[in-house]
Amino acid sequence: MITTEENIKQEVLEAVIIRFVGDSGDGMQLTGTQFSDTSAMFGNDIATFPNYPAEIRAPQGSLYGVSGFQVHIGSVEISTPGDEVDLLVAMNPAGLKTNLHAVKPGHTIIVDTDAFTKKNLAKAEYESNPLEDGSLENYRVIEVTMTSLTKEALKEIKGLDNKSIVRSKNMFALGMVYWMYNRSTDHTIAFFNKKFKSKPQIVEANTKVLNTGYYFAETLELIPNAYTIAPAKMKPGTYKIIMGNTATAWGFLAAAEKSGLDLFISSYPITPASDIFNEFVKHKHFGVKALQAEDEIAGITSAIGASFAGNLAITMTSGPGLALKGEALGLAMIIELPLVVINVQRGGPSTGLPTKTEQSDLLQSLYGRNGESPVIVIAASTPANCFDFAYEAAKLTIEHMTPVILLSDGYIASGSAPWKIKSVADMPEIKNNIIKEANENWHTYDRDENTLARKWPIPGTKGLEHRVGGLEKDRITGNVSYIADNHEYMTKIRAEKIKRVQNYIPNLTTEFTDNGDLLVIGWGGTYGSLYSSVKQLKDEGYKNIGLAHFNYINPMPKNTETVLKQFKKIVVCELNTGQFAKVLKINFNGFEFLQFNKIQGLPFGNSELTEKFKQLISS
Amino acid sequence: MESTAVKEYTYKDFASDQEVRWCPGCDDYVILRAMQKALPEMGVKKEDVVFISGIGCSSRFPYYMDTYGMHSIHGRAPAIATGVKLANPNLSVWVITGDGDAMAIGGNHFIHLLRRNVDLNIILFNNEIYGLTKGQFSPTSTVGLKTKSSPYGNTQPPFIPGELAIGAQARFFGRIGGNTPKEMTQIFIECEKFKGTSLIEVLQNCPIFNDGCFSQYTDKAVRADMQLFVEHGKPMIFGKERDKGLILNGLKLEVVTIGENGIEQEDLLIHNAKEQDPTLHQMLVRLRYPLVTGIIRSFDDITLEERQKEQTAEVKAKSSFMKVDDLFFSGDTYKVN
């Protein structure tokens, strides 16, 4: 293990934001992941966000081919990957050009000068070399001939081709950053040993380059000091760094085991939801039944079939796919079967911005079906709590016999954060409505008097043969009914069933203060941004600003109106033009819902939020 | 399933309490009764039978069967049935669909179900018309057919359902006239016995909007001369006098008469439904004279659920994960004290 020598000047920081950028093939995702995993294991709180082009292999050196990975680490609570960065590691001119705007003035940029060739500068549309023309004078630029140093370090190792040699320069950069932030290289070396088990040469080469980068930073006079970020105060437990999409899949694995139901998943690949399906299919050892369907409609309809046959059925998609699933969702609703539709929202409308985040599917989720067809809608708000809300979606759909739409978004789905691992034993019970035996008084549409859920009679059970379908149902027998009163009754009871879910979900909580001048309202994936901004204002002395973040959208928590009444002003912050604000306006009279909206395919930035909140408090 | 088992049920056990509401004279009644008669012969338990339909006249079918059933949405029955079967492979799952439901709005699910070879049965009610919407041309309507939506004649060339299905790798395809209940019952039983997706096209007369569209093949008076009812291992022979048959002439099927031009019965093609190569099956499906009925193709192949079961067993055998906790606490974890 390499340890920092005692004579190095140490500066203690609370938090730092680092961004690694380079070509799609430069290994920036791996570099960033290694740094964030190492930091998490050191005890820091972390949040990460990858940012890569929609093109799989964009032309080398091009501006749109830049791939980046941002990591925010701290000894304090970290709730977002952060906005402006303290350190930018740019492996080529295109990376520098597209990310320079995000670097805090006066802060550090490390560049591989070997990549700043005439050709690469031209591809990045630089008219002159930014390393020479003075355009970076407001930053502390550390110029390193990273490619040459990597080649030099590896000249002794035999049998490596030039491509492999050049490719390992990302480890040189990682080594430097490890030294700068006083991090051990152990975790990454262990990673090499495991990943390249059968290729000792590659292990040796990567280890060598990583160490070379580390020692280079140590001896480099350009780096004045190393920084220390102490471990964060986190709740005791066993942790793991988890991505939102992985956490979502795992929440359902836990729910299936807890409920004793087989898990059936079916979906059609779509960005950014595909990773959930990809995660599920890794776990056939748990008996997961999976179908990659021929289209979005088959994804949901096969799930409906599996649910009819008694499985916990899940389908997943993103905005355009939810539109295609609309008719089938109506069927699941009228036949009152459990079904979870995960919608990882992305920029819309139409194909929109597939790799960018947005919250613009809220109204579609609530109302995007023909007829009166309410369903439960809940939203995860952090990468780690994707686990909890996936579990909750499964619990609600099974216990209430109605479809649930679980909303996530590109930001939390691809972001990662520490997850305090939960054991299935600690998760709440899931009671199903499966009926095992026929008795003479049994009818298809008999309802539980509290939840109004109907029973779940499963094919294979003697005596419970019955028919369901998309035509309006008789209120008791479930036979087709065109009777006018029956239709009104059924429409109302289906709505009432959703409303009663209120009795089974937690109250809305307010953070920072229960009453005051300004209530910040958010929902879903914006939690981290809103939380850190309100916290910052509180730290600056603003005592009268509170945050109420919604995870339950339909129905909303029972105490919502009570919470709203405790504040003089309310601002609803969303990554859309105001969809949740509209919903609040419909449901709660007598309030003025101010709005703060952003529709750029990007998460909220800290400064734009704090500025807006300050302005609202003072006006 | 062995059909020799003691019969637990009669056809009445499969009739629901719902009043059947098809138009008088519709072949759908024949199909319903043939199914109710076939089920007791299959040796399946009533509670294990599931009928899934889409939308259309035919799709009311599940309401009339006292089994598990779902009348779903237009075109999606194959996908729903796939979910049912994968969720519980012990069930006997039937898709009830029509020409519009299966080959227009649900065309994608139809071909992918056949490709995947899930062990379920599809009964395709082909009447070459949209009945429930009151008489528009369908994807099997003939060119020139005058309908509500083609007052000057249909300009869209039709699908031949069997051709489309075998093109989509159907392992089992049968065709039967809507007015031959005995043969129909038998085919339904064969359908259930077959492991894989079996598709039966029923030439179903719609007496209201497309009356007589198959009568040139199905009328009692012409049936024997116009239909060749194929049976595996038997010569392709037809005609009232049993004197006509099929031979292969180059790349074409040719109708010959026994006793003419030196043709003897031994010269006729022998039907091999179990042949993997679908070339001859496709030729039989496309033939208009005679129209070929019976089980044209019945090629045994591994089913999707068998493949999945095998794979899951393999993965389970190699995995050290027994419970999801084993997964959660595996790999890069770290402790905070």
Image: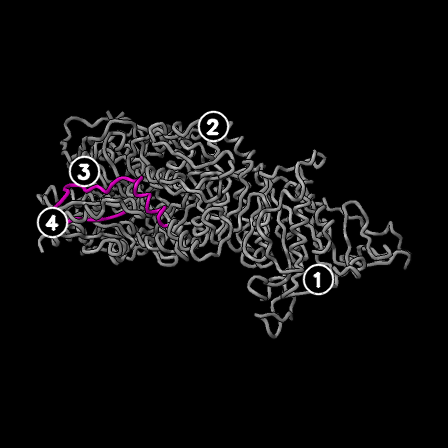
Q: Are marks 3 and 2 in contact (CB under 8 Å)?
A: no
What residue does disc 2 label?
Answer: B319
Chain under disc 1: B
Vertical side of A73 occupied by A526: above or below: below
| Residue A143 x/y as whole percent | 23, 44
Q: Earlier in the sequence, mark 4 or mark 3?
A: 3
What residue does disc 1 label?
Answer: B214
Chain under disc 4: A
In which quadrant of the rendered view does residue A379 lie?
A: top left
Vertical side of A399 occupied by B122: above or below: below
- Between A8 and A10, the residue placed more toward the observer is A10
Q: Are marks 3 and 1 in contact (CB under 8 Å)?
A: no
| Residue B85 x/y as whole percent | 55, 41
Question: Residue at horizontal 45%, vertical 49%?
Answer: A475
| Residue at far bottom of view | B152
* Colour pattern of the rendering: one colour
Chain under disc 2: B
Mark 4 vs mark 3: in front: 4
Mark 2 vs mark 4: in front: 4
Residue A15: image tag = 3
- Cα separation between marks 4 and 3: 30 Å
Q: Quadrant of the C terminus of chain A?
A: bottom left
**Type of amino acid under label 4:** Asp
- Cα separation between marks 2 and 4: 56 Å
| Residue B272 x/y as whole percent | 75, 46
Question: What span is colored magenta in the figure?
Answer: A495-523
Residue A169 seen: no
Mark 1 vs mark 2: in front: 1
Q: Quadrant of the N terminus of chain A?
A: top left
